[in-house]
Amino acid sequence: MTSIRISDGIVKDEILVVGLANKSTKGSKSTALSIESGDLALDNKALLATLQDLGATGKAEEIIKLPGNSTRLIVFTGLGKASPTYDNEVLRRAAGSAARAIAGNSSATFSLPAKNAQAIGAIAEGAGLGNYLFDRFRGSSKSEQKTPLKSITIHSELAKKSDVKDAIHKAEIIATYTHLVRDLINTPPSHLTPETFCDAITQAVKKAGGASAGLKVSVMTDSQLKSKGYGGIIAVGQGSSNPPRLLQLSYSPKGAKKKFAYVGKGITFDSGGLALKPAKGMEAMKSDMSGAAAVCAATIAIALLKVPIAIEAYAPLAENMVSDTATRPSDVISIYGGKTVEVINPDAEGRLILADALVKAQEGKDLDGIVDVATLTGAQVVALGTRTSAVMTNNTEFSEKFLVSTKKTGEAFWPMPLPIELRASLDSPVADLANIGERMGGMLVAGLFLKDFVADELPWLHLDIAGPAYNESAAHGYTPVGGTGIALRSLVQLALDSISQ
Ligand code: BES
Ligand code: MN
Ligand code: ZN
């Protein structure tokens, strides 16, 4: 765990991170720069002259390192256009870029412009999120990796305020559990199976305090799933020698004000099954359990933050493989609760395991809302790209609330419709419904499939995170290559914002 502290004293670290902004007006030849070092005064005149000579621009993602006076190094991180107040996400990203750029050192102090607890928290979060390395599977190349900072200090005059201390504590938890999500995503399917996923979460729950933190894990094995009628999870997992599981993680605080169910897609590898995916890019399908990792880690984070909202998290887990026992196109399966599905395409497997878990989550529980999180469709990536996730719902009020929460976190979500006319394309000539329908609007069709398994009167959100869950290009801001940990922050924020609503 990265430790993050707050201080209003003198800077003790050898590295100081500050902001650099651009205040040029359009058309002017030279770049006018502004050093944004928050509550720390620096010798700006001399530094600005050097920065000009170096051609600094202050643009986002720009990092400039200069020898310092009282510190060994001053690291300037781009904030973009100069402004009296900066957007929290601008601060979060700038801190994250800087944390990545100074990996290999042991500690740093961040002093960026922040006037309140939220902004200070965003800086701490960005620094903590950017401070990440996944090297578990490196052998001879391990020593070449630049290790993350061991300690992060945020400098602010507001250090003694209790809401600022709380924001730092929250940032530490958010960073730690986002790292857990990323670790699970990055772990190869040779090592992360439905069973070892359950082991990892059981361990993480223990580490977080287990029952004394209000947390409880239970796992259903493949034989239990089979005898209880979880036809979706069984059908998807039956082609693999790594048997499926259904993990349940509950957080039950005393005096809970509300209760939500969080359901996450946990395909530890998606080969496509008998609808085998092309080899190119298939390796990214180790990330198909991102939703499951996000809901489990978010639940632990919510418990550690002592949020008085009960959470029932469900992670249906299976490996979608090819073999003579794999589900065939045209097989008919029975989802938990009895609805039958004709499996036309075994690569549309996420909705099958989610259907089982959604039905289970609603069983005899007085929920105030249910949220599923899934790397569900390639169509999501086509529609919204790799950095914006989709939210679909049966209750606009709930999704609007959720979108307000997501904005605070810096995670990009965008509302998508569930057009009723597309539902007919999921009709099957032999079963209650088919697992694929109209190809156009595939993300919405998948959402409509899930909607069939949620009671109309229960507020429900479906989050399709297919693109944003896994970064296949370069690192940026606080986002590394590989698993990103998307959705964790919004799931935590939704719980926090639901206390008083
Ligand atoms: N796991 C994939 C979706 C996916 C695609 C996630 C790209 C992340 C990046 C999902 O199981 C899948 O294969 N979906 C199919 C559905 C189709 C067969 C209706 C798809 O999107 O092609
Ligand atoms: Mn698939
Ligand atoms: Zn999948």
Image (spheres, grey):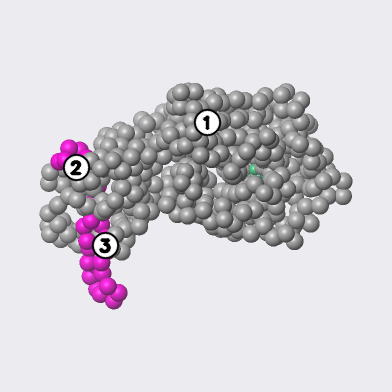
Query: Real-space Cα distance between discs 2 and 3?
Result: 21 Å
Residue farthest bottom in this picture: 27
Q: Which of marks 2 and 1 is nearer the N terminus?
A: 2
Residue sitting at x 34%, y 34%? 2
* Badge number at residue 8: 2
Point out the stretch of residues depicted in magenta: 7-36
Q: Report x, y in % for residue 240.
A: 70, 30
Whether residue 283 appears in this view of the structure is no
Element under disc 1: loop
Element under disc 3: loop
Q: Which residue position is annotated with label 3?
A: 84
Q: Which residue position is annotated with label 1?
A: 252
Q: Nearer the viewer, residue 274 or 404?
A: 404
Q: Which corner quadrant of the image does residue 168 belong to?
A: top left
What amino acid type should be assigned to the residue bearing mark 2? Asp
Asked if marks 2 and 3 touch (Cβ < 8 Å), the reply is no
What amino acid type should be assigned to the residue bearing mark 3? Pro
Residue 118 vertical placement versus 264 (above, below)? below
Q: Which of marks 2 and 3 is nearer the N terminus?
A: 2
Query: Real-space Cα distance between discs 2 and 1?
Result: 37 Å
Asked if marks 2 and 1 touch (Cβ < 8 Å), the reply is no
Q: Which of marks 1 and 3 is nearer the N terminus?
A: 3
Report the mark closest to the observer, 2 or 1.
1
Left or right, 98 with reference to 185: left
Residue sitting at x 28%, y 40%? 162
